[in-house]
Amino acid sequence: QPLVQRTPFQSHSYGFGQHGHRHLHETRIFSSDGVSEDDKERSVSVSVDSNCWNPSIRKLFVVLSSIGMAETGYLSYLKLFDPNGINSICGGGDVSSMNSISSCSSVLNSPYGSIQVNEEVIIPLTAIGFLAYSTIAGLSALPLLSNTNEYEQEAEADNDMNIDSMNRIAILCTTTSMATFSSFLISLLFNTLHQSCPYCILSATLSFTMGFTAWFSGMLPNDNKSSKEGIKYALGSFVTTVVMSLTFFFSIDQASISAYQNDILAANGLSNNIVAAATEEESKQNIPPPPITTTSSERSLKIGKDLKELNSRFFCAYWCSHCYEQKLRLGKEAMTNVQYIECSKEGLNSQAAVCNDRKVPGYPTWEIGGKLYPGEMYLDELEDIIAKAKKD
């Protein structure tokens, strides 16, 4: 049977004491264990609050993950149900129609933008991101929404702390995995695709922020056992994510990559042949200039001798047509007295660093008497410059 206790000065009924003073009384109901119902409610409230780690950080994670869910959810919807939607929000055209496309759409539509399970099932990476953000939102919000009124919860406090520790470890592992995979995707973005994508950067920023916050805000439980378990599982999630990222990278079909690159080139008005030719040319080294086929005149020989006496230099590049015409004008005998400086990195005996240090403005450029004279010169022009240098 519940017990009744009357407490002075807190009352729902009134009475008079021995000296006629009016006293206030409050009726409080006690259960058979001697604990009041109000104390039970306060105890439950304290128990719930004490078992929920850092509500402010949890709320922050709910906000950040909600932003990520909104972004990845919308992009996933467009990828799955509106093929041209990605191009429209990125401000580009349709790749298949060979129109100009933006970096954003080229990244999201690239072979690295989806996981192909089989010929019929293709999962956008944005959908996996949506699942990850949803997991973080759920794990972060669940303890905040938990509000049990069972008095027995106080007796189960130790068990509740274990549940909270498991929840925190799950958040730590998930955010670690997300940050690791985002690092891999950002590396792909800039080092492999050589594109920019604001949606990708936003998602990576959210993942990095949550991962950093999880590790440096005390998300890892403090007790020794839970702390060791947390580190073990977090390290496992990191290693697993690295392995899965590399597996994903090497699983992309080379034919798909080539087709993607061709689409990008075509959309920008280029062809594979042009790029291949440029690449082949750039890969060459020690390319000699074309041979001088003319014979020097007496006048040219005199100019060549004067240029040598003045320690003159002739800055040029093997591919420069004006350089070649200058050499033909002087002839091969006269040019043997001229100090030739190859400024192209791919040219034979390249001295590109010397050209950069001298701040050569263009090709050809003569250095006579310590002064630079850019441009192709006629013989009389060279003679005038030599005469002036000798006077100086």
Image: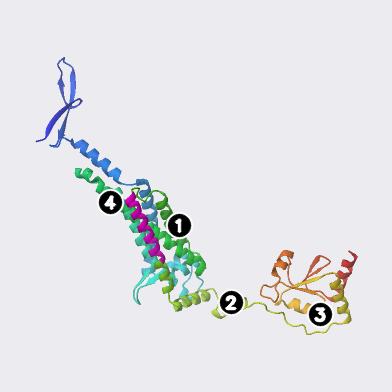
Considering every residue shown, the one lying at the far right of the view is 391
The amino acid at mark 1 is Thr
SS of the residue under disc 1: helix
Local crowd size for mark 2, using a 10 Å CA cut-off: few (<14), some (14–19), many (≥20): few
Q: Which of marks 4 and 3 is nearer the N terminus?
A: 4
The amino acid at mark 4 is Ile
Magenta segment, which residues? 224-242
Local crowd size for mark 3, using a 10 Å CA cut-off: few (<14), some (14–19), many (≥20): many
Disc 3 designates what residue? 329
Q: Which labelled disc corresponds to residue 163? A: 4
C-alpha distance separating marks 4 and 1: 29 Å
Disc 2 designates what residue? 279
Q: Which residue is drawn at 43% across and 69% down?
A: 246
- The percent coordinates of residue 205 (x first, y second) are 45, 57
SS of the residue under disc 3: helix
Considering every residue shown, the one lying at the far left of the view is 1
**Image-quadrant location for residue 3:** top left
